[in-house]
Image (cartoon, rainbow, N blue to C red):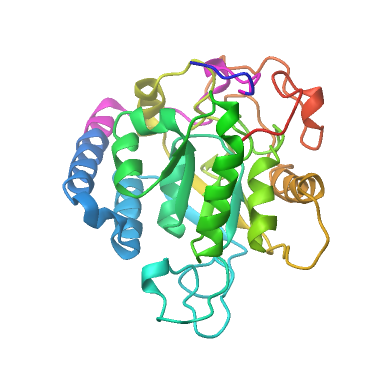
Amino acid sequence: MNGPWDVRAVCTPRCAAHTAPPLPLPGTARRATAFAGAVGRALTAGPRLADPVRLRAYARALLTALSVGLEVRGAATGADPLTVPAAPGAEPGARPAERAPGAAGAPGTLIALNHISWLDIVALLAVEPATLLAKREVGHWPLVGGLARRAGTHFIDRTSPRRLPQTVRELSALLAAGRSVAVFPQATTWCTADQGAFRRATFQAALDAGAPVRPVTVDYVQHGHPTTVAAFCGDDTFAASLRRVITASGLTVRVTVHPALPTAGRGLDRRALAGAVERVVLGGGRGNRLCGGSRSGGAGACTGGAPGGVRPADRPGQALGTYL
């Protein structure tokens, strides 16, 4: 069911195409078996999956089963490159229960990413198991939905505009309590990392909590060449997308971590903050532009993508540009 503020991306399943010849059937079968086993082990972990150490390990196991490489660029030092270090007396990105009693903890970090695929979620959790903010439909996706629910994902209903203020308050409370929260402010998926526009509501939560914002760019390559094979756009099905990923040879997800943007005491409004983060994230994807081009003869093609940096009013379905 679509809400009045849903975004209609111009990307379609035709945008997704292999950049290299697909894996032969025997290799595909082995990957499918390995992936099913990794998912089964993660699901049987139950509530324990929410433990950050376990969650990162299971996410990395899923990528390994799919033979998807993980490349983290520009990461800060430390185990959690996406979370801004907290003030003395608080663990970086710690959940409230993990803080010392009475400790004056710093807020968590709002991690803002572009959105290409369901695989973005797995890659993010493999880098740092932050709390995810996702549309409620994600909770019903096969396999990934179950993992997202067990990982403590905070689901939102985009079909109910009246809940927007409450959602912003809840997100702000999570950040103020020291939770690092990852959001996909484009509100939909695009086939490359230089398209789309950022909604502003989640950035209001960061301003209210005085939380820093960490821009992150996610993109995909096959054998070092830009690829759209992992894209999950339009009316695509999870099964079809998973089939493309399983058959993709030399696939790597690249997570580029940009310097954090502080918000406390900066006098920013959500429009300025969202615009600044959008320019960093989508600008980090430029130079890797590929829209359905296939070195192996695929016929994928996008139907009129727009470059990053164009404001939401210029995009289909983004006239208001303020919803999650």
Q: Is residue 280 left or right of residue 100?
A: right
Residue 276 x, y percent position in the rendering: 79, 50
Magenta region, residue range: 6-29
Location of residue 12 with respect to 83 vertically, above or below: above
Location of residue 153 with respect to 82 vertically, above or below: above
Q: Is residue 140 left or right of residue 269?
A: left
Relative depth, front residue between 168 and 315:
168
Q: Is residue 316 left or right of residue 311?
A: left
Residue 202 x, y percent position in the rendering: 63, 45
Relative depth, front residue between 11 and 138:
138
Location of residue 49 with respect to 194 vertically, above or below: below
Q: Quadrant of the C terminus?
A: top right
Residue 166 falls in which quadrant of the image?
top right
Instruction: Tell me the residue at 56%/14% (across/down).
Output: 299
Magenta stretch, overall SS? loop
Task: Please tell me whether residue 13 belongs to the stretch shown in magenta.
Answer: yes
Residue 249 falls in which quadrant of the image?
top left
* Residue 189 appears in the picture as rendered: no
Residue 122 x, y percent position in the rendering: 41, 46
Residue at the outermost bottom position: 88
Relative depth, front residue between 136 and 20:
136
Residue 73 x, y percent position in the rendering: 59, 60
Q: Is residue 162 left or right of residue 286?
A: left
Instruction: Tell me the residue at 33%/42% (across/down).
Output: 149
